[in-house]
Amino acid sequence: MIVITGATGSIGRALVAQLAGQDVLAVSRKPADLGVRHAVGDFTAPETIGRLLSPGDRLFLNSSPFPAFAERLNEVIDLAAEAGVAQIVEVSVRDAAPGAALSAGPHGEVDEHLRASGVPHAILQPTGFMQNLLGEVRGDRFHGSWGTGGMNYIDARDIAAVAAALLTRPVGASGSYLLTGPESPSHEEIAATMTGVLGRPVSYVDLPVPEMAARLAGQGIPEPFATELATAQATLSRTGWAEITTAVEEVTGRPPRTLAAFLADHADAFLPAS
Ligand SMILES: NC(=O)c1ccc[n+]([C@@H]2O[C@H](COP(=O)([O-])OP(=O)(O)OC[C@H]3O[C@@H](n4cnc5c(N)ncnc54)[C@H](OP(=O)(O)O)[C@@H]3O)[C@@H](O)[C@H]2O)c1
């Protein structure tokens, strides 16, 4: 059986769809109709997920961050080892390392715990998700502190495709996969691609970090997270998040989706503000 945590998320939904016909158990905190067998499980109570696991299962380990994320996910890894799970495919983040900024710190702790667990594993370390852009465009513009550097984005559906391949082939050697999309445009270039694909002008407005942090705070993101997020934007596109890998194609046999393809598939979600 393939147990999919985070099944209601942007990766999880795509993974459930891509595993049609397989013996799948989808897991999230509330009952959800995903067209497959579903169980309720909450990482904040690790035993609610541990009790779903049986010897030989393959586990897709994924959740958005929450307080004590690393401690609780590490407990689930221990429960999976006790249950005799055959493989864990975990979603981490690019540059994850204990002590790193934002979610990269807790993700790094989970990655280290998984590497030491003795359970065969694959650690997926994706770059920023194209899906993030859906929430950022307001009418004809979007804001950020990205500056002029290139930034790589990946379509979450390609992360799901990598996970689907790894969860359905015989368990191989354990390792980490830095997953990227095929191009690393500046945010001005992203705006130009949006303009072309969506058929209406979209512009990118670059803001100094304090102004971007205030804007994020105004959208409900609490401090100090708002400032950390704006600071991360200002540094990421200068510090290597433009680098492109071939991991998606190597695992799935086809190249990752372009930004233009992602935008065309989600054009309805970018309707102008009324
Ligand atoms: N966004 C990015 O640019 C980016 C880049 C690199 C890595 N990542 C990593 O990608 C992961 C999230 O990806 P995603 O597409 O799945 O996110 P998502 O669309 O926000 O979905 C989050 C999933 O986590 C589940 N979840 C949250 N808290 C939970 C809990 N306490 N117990 C059980 N399930 C819980 C949610 O299920 P419910 O239905 O129960 O809420 C949902 O299925 C995170 O680890 C994030 O750090 C993100």
Image (spheres, rainbow, N blue to C red):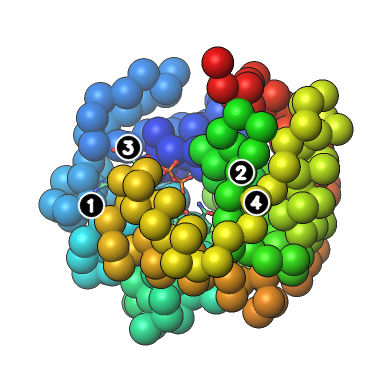
- Say which element carries label 1: loop
Disc 2 crowd rating (10 Å Cα; few below 14, some 14-19, many 20+) is: some
Q: Nearer the viewer, mark 4 or mark 1?
A: 4
Residue 238 in picture, x, y percent from top left: 68, 76
Q: Amino acid at mark 3?
A: Val
Quadrant (top left, top right, bottom left, bottom right) of the N terminus: top left
User: Would you say the beta carbon of the disc 1 residue lies within 8 angstroms of ligand 1?
Assistant: yes
Q: Is residue 53 visible?
A: yes
- Say which element carries label 4: strand
Q: Nearer the viewer, residue 98 or 77?
A: 98
Q: Which residue is mark 2?
A: 142
Judge from the rendering whether residue 164 lies leftward or rightward of residue 246; answer left or right.
Answer: left
Residue 158 in picture, x, y percent from top left: 67, 45
**Circle nearer the N terminus (4, 1):** 1
**Circle nearer the N terminus (2, 4):** 2
Judge from the rendering whether residue 55 lies leftward or rightward of residue 139; answer left or right.
Answer: left
Q: Nearer the viewer, residue 257 or 201?
A: 201
Q: Is residue 28 above or below residue 169?
A: above
Residue 135 in picture, x, y percent from top left: 52, 38
User: Would you say the beta carbon of the disc 3 residue lies within 8 angstroms of ligand 1?
Assistant: yes
